[in-house]
Structure formats: structure tokens, C-alpha cells
Image (cartoon, rainbow, N blue to C red):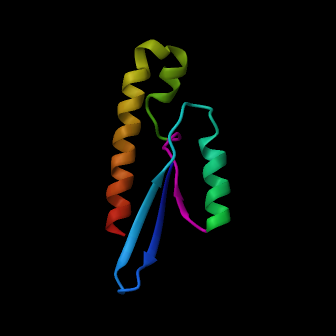
Amino acid sequence: MLFKKSVYLSNNKLLIMHFAIAGNIGAGKTSLTELLSEHYGWEANYEDVIDNPYLDDFYTHMERWSFNLQVYFLNSRFRQLLAAKGK
């Protein structure tokens, strides 16, 4: 999960902060993200689980697909950071 928060400093420069929440599958990252996003008014970005081509395979055979799944999540997070930086 990734948060983006923009703040203007006293010298009128824009400071963009990114906060990431990491953890094991089923640890509650989405729930925590929803609570923090709602409470602080932050923009939340979530891990791609709908279009993830490895998630079903991972749950079927974890030892075989865990590396592929983690690389997919890493690439997805990298693309989220690039998109957030461009906003």
C-alpha cells in the first residue's frame, strides 16, 4: 500500500511525501490503509490483486510461485511510485 501526501512548506516549495505499508499476505495492510487514508485524508494506492497473473498460482503452489509474485508486486510498486511522482 502506498500513500501520497502533498504539503507546502513555509518557503512555498511543494513537499510530496510517500508512505508505504508492507507486510505478509493477510496481515491487515488494506484495513490499515483504509483507516489511515480516511482519518488523514491521504490518497491511497493498493496492490494490484485483480489483474495479478501470479496470485492464483501462488495460492496453488506457494514454493513455486512466491518469487514471481514478489517480483510482480515490486514492479507494481515501482510503477505506482513513478505515477505518484508524475502527479
Position of 67 compared to 3: left or right? Answer: left
Seen at 49% across and 44% down, the residue is: 47
Residue that lies at the very extreme toward the front in this rendered image: 10
**Image label count:** 0
Q: Where is residue 82 in the image (x, y as percent from the top left)?
A: 31, 57
Determine the residue positioned at 64% across, 54% down.
34
Residue at image position (36%, 86%) is 12
Res 75 → quadrant: top left
Q: In this view, does 85 lie to the left or right of 19?
A: left
82 vs 15: above or below: above
Which residue appears at 35% of the width and 86% of the height?
Answer: 11
34 lies left or right of 46: right
Question: Residue 10 location, x and y as percent?
Answer: 41, 85
Query: Residue 79 location, x and y as percent?
Result: 34, 51
Residue 43 x %, y %? 53, 64
Quadrant where the image shows the C terminus? bottom left
| Residue 17 in which image quadrant | bottom left
In the image shown, does 42 or 50 lie closer to the viewer? 42
Give, as a single range, the part of the protein colored magenta: 41-50
Magenta: main secondary structure equals: loop
